[in-house]
Image (cartoon, grey):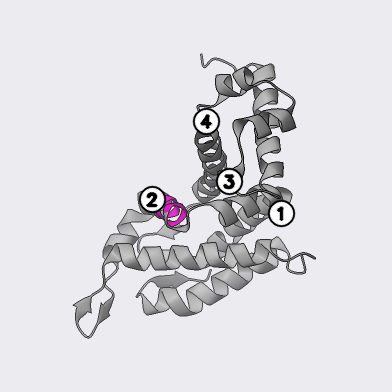
């Protein structure tokens, strides 16, 4: 039977994470110290170190939580059927993820703004590749008979996803809802990029 996490530990983790996120609104990552985080969370340094190795470990765990939500959404539906992409299911899944982003705007903004873009793209690429290796391996994208590496193609799609997410997070008045934004992203990708890449699109 898995061991339950002590509620006090969860509460302290939450306080530390919230303090760190608040500090990132006014300071760069490099300028934030453990003392800053401890003071903001109203704990001592020893308590911080009992939960995290350092601020890098803290930030890494925040990223893991964010990407974990993304991965969980992907796992809810069978988005790929044989060699076809089910657009409606992807749109539904993306809507759920964007709703999570709307509910946690500070978390999402910090992930997108303060993360190393290459590392974040690599992490997203790993998640997508793990789940959809079959369709990725079937891609045969060429330019003047020169085969384009699949990892480049997937990285390109990933960069579009992170770039559009960054733009949406920056919208102050939430003029575009989660479902509207998911529909827009899917329309742009499915009608252009995926078709060019030779991916079969299932609209049903």
The earlier-in-sequence mark between 4 and 2 is 4
Percent across and percent down for residue 2 are: 52, 17
Q: Main secondary structure of the magenta part?
A: helix
Asked if the residues shown at circle 1 and circle 2 are in contact, with their CB atoms under 8 angstroms apart, the answer is no
Q: Is residue 161 magenta?
A: no
Disc 2 secondary structure class: helix
Residue for point 66% across, 48% down: 27
Of the residues tagged 2 and 3, which is closer to the observer? 3
Badge 2 is on which residue?
126
Residue appearing at x 54%, y 66% in the figure: 163
Pointer 1 or 3: first along the chain: 3
Crowd class of label 3 (few under 14; some 14 to 19; many from 20; radius 10 Å) = some
Q: What distance separates the C-alpha of mark 1 from that of mark 2? A: 24 Å
Judged from this view, the residue extending furthest toward the bottom is 144
What label does residue 102 carry, if any? 1
For the point 66% across and 49% down, which residue is it?
100
Which of pointers 4 and 1 lies earlier in the amino acid sequence? 4
Report whether residue 88 is seen: yes
Q: Give the Cα separation between the discs numbered 2 and 3.
A: 25 Å
Q: Is residue 124 magenta?
A: yes
Q: Position of residue 26 (x, y in %)?
A: 71, 50
Q: Are marks 4 and 3 in contact (CB under 8 Å)?
A: no
Pointer 4 local density, CA inside 10 Å: few below 14, some 14–19, many at least 20: few
Name the quadrant containing residue 153: bottom left
Q: Which residue is mark 4?
A: 54
Choose mark 4 or mark 1, whichever is in front. Answer: 4
Query: Mark 4 against mark 2, which lies toward the viewer?
Result: 4
Q: Is residue 53 above or below residue 165?
A: above
Indicate which label's residue lies in the foreground, 1 or 3.
3
**Quick one: SS at disc 4?**
loop
């Amino acid at each position: 039977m898995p061991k339950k996490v002590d509620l006090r530990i969860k509460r302290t983790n939450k306080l530390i994470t919230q303090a760190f996120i608040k500090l990132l609104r006014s300071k760069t990552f490099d300028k934030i110290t453990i003392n800053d985080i401890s003071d903001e969370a109203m704990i001592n340094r020893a308590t911080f170190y009992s939960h995290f190795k350092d601020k890098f470990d803290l930030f890494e765990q925040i990223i893991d939580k964010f990407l974990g939500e993304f991965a969980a959404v992907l796992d809810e539906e069978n988005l790929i059927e044989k060699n076809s992409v089910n657009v409606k299911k992807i749109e539904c899944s993306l809507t759920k993820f964007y709703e999570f982003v709307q509910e946690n705007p500070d978390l999402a903004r910090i992930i997108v703004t303060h993360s190393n873009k290459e590392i974040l793209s690599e992490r997203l690429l790993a998640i997508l590749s793990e789940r959809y290796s079959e369709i990725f391996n079937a891609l045969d994208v060429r330019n003047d008979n020169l085969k384009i590496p699949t990892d480049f193609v997937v990285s390109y799609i990933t960069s579009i996803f992170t770039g559009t997410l960054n733009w949406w997070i920056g919208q102050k008045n939430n003029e575009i809802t989660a479902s509207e934004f998911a529909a827009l992203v899917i329309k742009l990708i499915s009608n252009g990029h995926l078709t060019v890449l030779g991916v079969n699109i299932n609209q049903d």
